[in-house]
Image (cartoon, grey):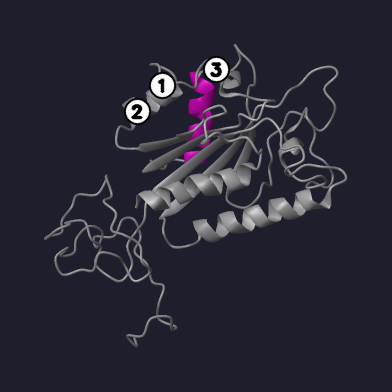
Amino acid sequence: MDGIFGTWDDGLRLTIDSNCIDAADGDAAPSTDICGLKRFNHRDVVNEGTGEPNYVEIGAYEVGPRVVVMCWIDESDNAYYSTTDPNCEERFNDDLAKYRNLVDSGKFEIVKSGCLAPLPKGPGVPPPFRTIEGVLPYNYFDPPVPESVSVEDPPEGISIYEFPRTNPDPNRDDFINHFNRICDGMVPDYLCLSVDNSGSMYTSIIEPGYSEADPNFIGWIKTKYPDTIIKRRDVAPPDPDAFTNERWVDEMRIQIQNVVDDL
């Protein structure tokens, strides 16, 4: 161990079950870790530290929060999907690179993201908008996926699932089942919820089941996981926080950056 940051012996981080989490002397420790991450109070860890704050990690690296992002979007026409515009694929790849840079920045214990695609279906709806292909660049799959299936090989670290689109199809259990699939047993410190309100879709399209009204999805989250912080971007224009450009990967990055801004 050479005591010099940025050399071969660096990057050794704590695991979430380490006894060194929330166990240091907060009076003796700097306000951030060696990478500039602010101290984070893990809600499922008993604070064994001393001083102020009493939830500093022992060692050079702070263990960041667990984040889950859920984004509902019906299609990404002219943002990521186009049969003729090569900028769509470039835009998707650029947004994905920025997303991964942030996720891999060392500011989080883990990030799990899921794109939920409530796509229109039925006679007269042209391909690919009867399938989940419409949220990805043209020819992302070779051969194309059949209709009414979930993506088996999505972008790394992001799950993509079909989701019921119109009332009365979505109900609380649909939301809970997808939340559980994305979390895979992990209880998030932050849950970020985004809904496309671009015109072809609005938040009302995934009602009933989504809202805070008990026993719907957000109400269920608040009851079952009262310590989870919920960050929502599900409003309609002209609200400046409305998600309207259909770039759902970038929307996930924005939500994760909002978590960073909280830390």
Magenta stretch: helix, strand or loop mostly = helix
Q: Quadrant of residue 55?
A: bottom left
Image quarter in which the N terminus is found: bottom left
Of the residues tagged 2 and 1, which is closer to the observer? 1
For marks 2 and 1, the one nearer the N-term is 1
97 or 114: nearer the viewer:
97
Q: Quadrant of residue 174?
A: top right
For marks 3 and 2, the one nearer the N-term is 3
In the depicted structure, whether residue 158 falls above or below residue 206: below
Q: Are marks 3 and 2 in contact (CB under 8 Å)?
A: no
For marks 1 and 3, the one nearer the N-term is 3
From which residue to which does the magenta span run? 172-183
Q: CA distance from mark 2 to mark 1?
A: 8 Å
> Viewed as shown, does residue 124 lie left or right of 24?
right
User: Where does residue 67 sit, x and y in percent of width and height?
Assistant: 43, 46
Circle 1 residues within 10 Å: few <14, some 14–19, many ≥20 = few
User: Is residue 188 among the parts visible in the rendering?
Assistant: no
Amino acid under disc 3: Glu
Can you identify the residue that label 1 sits on? 212
Can you identify the residue that label 3 sits on? 207
At a point 56% along the width and 26% down the height, the residue shown is 236
Examine the structure image and report whether residue 177 is included in the region drawn in magenta: yes
Circle 1 SS class = loop
User: Where does residue 88 sit, x and y in percent of width and height?
Assistant: 77, 48
In the depicted structure, whether residue 213 falls above or below residue 26: above
Q: Quadrant of residue 164?
A: top right
Amino acid under disc 2: Lys
Circle 2 residues within 10 Å: few <14, some 14–19, many ≥20 = some
Q: Are marks 1 and 3 in contact (CB under 8 Å)?
A: no
